[in-house]
Image (tube, grey):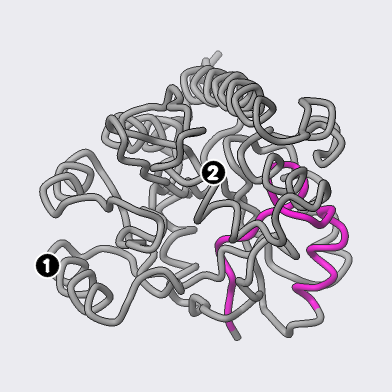
Amino acid sequence: MSYDLHTHSVLSDGTQSVEELVAEIAHCGLTGFSLTDHDTTAGWQSAQKYADDWGLDFLPGMEISCAIGPLSVHLLSYGHQQNDSVLNEHITQARTSRRTRAQRIVQKLSETYPITWEDVLAQASPGATIGRPHIADALVNANIIKTRSEAFSGLLADHSAYYVPYRAVHPVDAVTMVKAAGGVPIMAHPRARIRGQVASAELIEQMIEAGLSGLEIYHRDNNEEDRNWLKKLAQKYDLIITGSSDYHGAGKPNRLAENTTPPQTVERIKEIIRQNHQKNTPPQHTQTI
């Protein structure tokens, strides 16, 4: 009995529809899952429907793009209220920034390679959060490179001549927003050195002070030494420890359920969500006649 709490569909940068994703999750023998598309909750309703159809437990989630200068940080938000205006305003701005950034990257690439913005749009589903993965898919489709992974280690890497920065919220502010929206903030792949620069201990502790609830420790991009360091940090601050695949379908080598989270941990997350939502619900006043 286990959960995969970090998965993506075509609504962000995954390669499967929500229906296809949930069916594959069911065939993996998982108890439940979370759909954590980048900066969108568009898949929550259909994910819940297909989870019910397959007898799976669904925990609503989202992956929020954060940054401090060149440092990219990702924050997983579980169970926040979908109608929170502050958080919704941020993710709308983030999606717009991602799209503008992608357009600028394609413009730079097009000066050297046969790729157009229309090629990128052809790789994305309607309403998807457009980003670098879709550019990577367009590069693959044009036979410029072979895989997404090759794109992110070369043409689309942070050190590439085609790199373009984008607007993203400070991770400490993101934690605050998620908490205010009734959600449970958990830092995604906090020591993913393979992706480039990682968050310092000082930054993670600032996020904890702001209300960070947990760390995604069991992730393929956290090496063993860093996992041990993160576990000590989690023990020190009584943080939730999760394990996830960060599954994107055919887009990345990550496989469903390669790292998982036990039910008791998921129940702890759900209990915090219940408590947060109760705090955010105005009291009902009754009049005695």
Quadrant containing the N terminus in the rendered view: bottom right
| Spot occupied by residue 164 in the image (x, y as percentages of width and height) | 47, 27
Left or right of 241: which side holds 142?
A: right
Comparing 261 with 71, the one in front is 71
Residue at 25%, 43% in the rendered image = 211
Where disc 2 sits, the SS reads: loop
| Spot occupied by residue 31 in the image (x, y as percentages of width and height) | 67, 78
| Spot occupied by residue 251 in the image (x, y as percentages of width and height) | 70, 60
Against 238, residue 206 (above or below) is above
Residue 74 sits inside the magenta stretch: no
Residue 54 occupies quadrant: bottom right
Against 147, residue 84 (above or below) is above
Left or right of 129: which side holds 4?
A: left
**Res. 83 visible in picture:** no
Other residues around mark 2 within 10 Å, as few (<14) / some (14–19) / many (≥20): many
Residue at 84%, 27% in the rendered image = 118
Q: Which residue is mark 2?
A: 156
Query: Which mark is on residue 218?
Result: none
| Spot occupied by residue 273 in the image (x, y as percentages of width and height) | 46, 49
From the image, state whether disc 2 or disc 1 is nearer to you.
2
- CA separation in Å, label 2 and label 1: 37 Å
Quadrant containing the C terminus in the rendered view: top right
Residue 257 occupies quadrant: bottom right
Query: Callout 2, which amino acid?
Result: Leu
Query: Callout 1, which amino acid?
Result: Lys
Q: Which residue is mark 1?
A: 236
Residue 3 sits inside the magenta stretch: yes
Query: Which stretch appears magenta?
Result: 2-26
